[in-house]
Amino acid sequence: MYLRRVTSKGYEYWQLAHNIRDPQTGRTKPIILYNFGRADRVDKDALRRLVRSVARFLPPDEQAEIQRQLGFEWPFEYLGSQKLGGTWLLDGLWRRLEIDRTLQRLLAGRGYRTPVERLIFAMVANRALEPSSKLAMEDWVAGEVHVRDLPEVEVHQLYRAMDFLLEAAADIQREVFWSIANLLNLDVDLIFFATTTTYFEIEGQDPDGLRRWGRNHHHPRLAEVLIGFAVTRGGIPVRCWVWPGNTADASVVQEVKRDLNGWKLNRVLLVMDTGFNSAENRRILQGAGGHYLVGEKLRLGPDGRPPEPLGRGGKDKKLPDGLEIKEVIVGPGSPARRRFVIVLNPEEAERDHKKRESILQELKKRLAELEQLDAQAHTKAVCWLRAHETFGRYLRQGRGGRLVIDRQKVQREARLDGKFLVSSSDDFLSAEDLAYGYKQLWQIKRIHRDLKHVVDIRPVHHRLEDRIRSHVLLCWLALLLIRVAENETGRTWQQIKKLTSAIDVGHHRTVNGEVSQVRPLGTEQKDLFRALELEPPPRYLKIQPRSPKPA
């Protein structure tokens, strides 16, 4: 097939022709497929459209070569796409909580030439969406996701932004706290606190640094750091701390108390787990007019005897949700006076009973199997059973060293089914409020779980102490955005990520310029942005007209 030119009566004509071979003569002859008419009247734009239409079926390199030879541009070219939904939603929350303004205010007058606030947001979004190293973020920002006003990053810029984040850590945490407390109308009189650890895959430890051997039973010979979070009643983390892995509890509580006092809160009741319950810690928590709500151990001493309040009489009160509570005052009228609340959860008591019965049935089976062993095998099996974490608690040695089930221990355990014990220095809150307040401590347990499995804080690969602390701050900001999103939408973060992952932006080049078009949002996606009071991404993210060619 080719374009044929013929002359007739002094005029030139263009024809679309195709040669075929005559079966009788064996010679080729042209077949006219289409007449374009006189050459001086041919619609050349129509010819260009025809060439472009035919060239669509050629390989890309041949298309480009035709474009170059004929000197015309394709009307439409697809340049690629980027994920948009997750970063757009997080950026909307970031701005709604005024974290961007807080950072920009703290950055004022520092003379940075790089967009530090945007760099910090990009690292926070990365932790929340697809945790990766700072080096990998160069490709993540440039090619995989769209971050508003940040087309690309370089790793040294990220590290410099991390340095600023640490320099202004105290101011940032205070400003962010009051900003979200006012905007979200948070109840901040009840602050939960607990610690967790994260480890480093290195040999040895830093003698005078953060990375120290601690008390982690799962990774006993790996250096670690101790991380603490202060969390509101709604599960929103409002402050974080980092200490060496071997830091004592007393110094942790003292620093937490001092830092929260610096925020000049009207009234704070710190809620802590049993691990922080000591006379010294309780004294610190009551300093400067503060109060504590801490868990108490239900088993004391090597024989597992219950604490004194459990043996005291009192009137039980049944709450609407089925919980039963009893308030006990020990040492009334003396300096050693303490207020306790015993809480019984009937559903949990039933679960504890069934679990213990299952353990005892298995224990009876194992004791029967011991009778069939002798000599060294018998001795080894007895030692293993006595030392077992679960079975050993219900065993005692009878006459002749024979193992038997300790019925007194079983009875003592039965009396503790479904119960937990708390104490508080606050006399103004009701026993019901104290019970529910401590029960909400599970919120901070979720923070610890998400810290390790959602934002992937561990293992930490940073070596310098400042970078480690800054890395934890980035994880804190990511968890802050995640929890606000979950609280206001009623969805889990995994569900939110799944909905937003389908929102992407396609980049196209046309003869008139470049355009970035966003995939249309579905009903659930629109409802998600509406619940968070955020503007969804516009239909067209960018329309950039082509610059006119110089004359």
Image: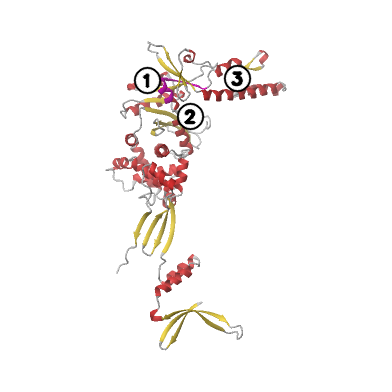
Q: Earlier in the sequence, mark 3 or mark 2?
A: 2
Nearer-the-camera pick, 322 or 253: 322
Q: Secondary structure at mark 3?
A: helix
**Residue 296 position in % (x across, y down):** 46, 20
Q: Which mark is residue 426?
A: 1
Q: Position of residue 16 (x, y in %)?
A: 48, 78
Residue receiving disc 3: 394
Q: CA distance from mark 3 to mark 2?
A: 30 Å
Label located before the other in sequence (3 or 1): 3
The type of residue carrying mark 3 is Tyr
- The amino acid type of the residue labelled 1 equals Asp
Distance between mark 2 and mark 1 Cα atoms: 33 Å
Q: Residue furthest bottom?
A: 9
Can you see residue 67?
Answer: yes
Query: Does the stretch in magenta take in 428?
Result: yes
Region rendered in magenta: 418-437
Q: Residue at x 41, y 81 (%)?
A: 39
**Which of the pair 60/461 is nearer the observer?**
60
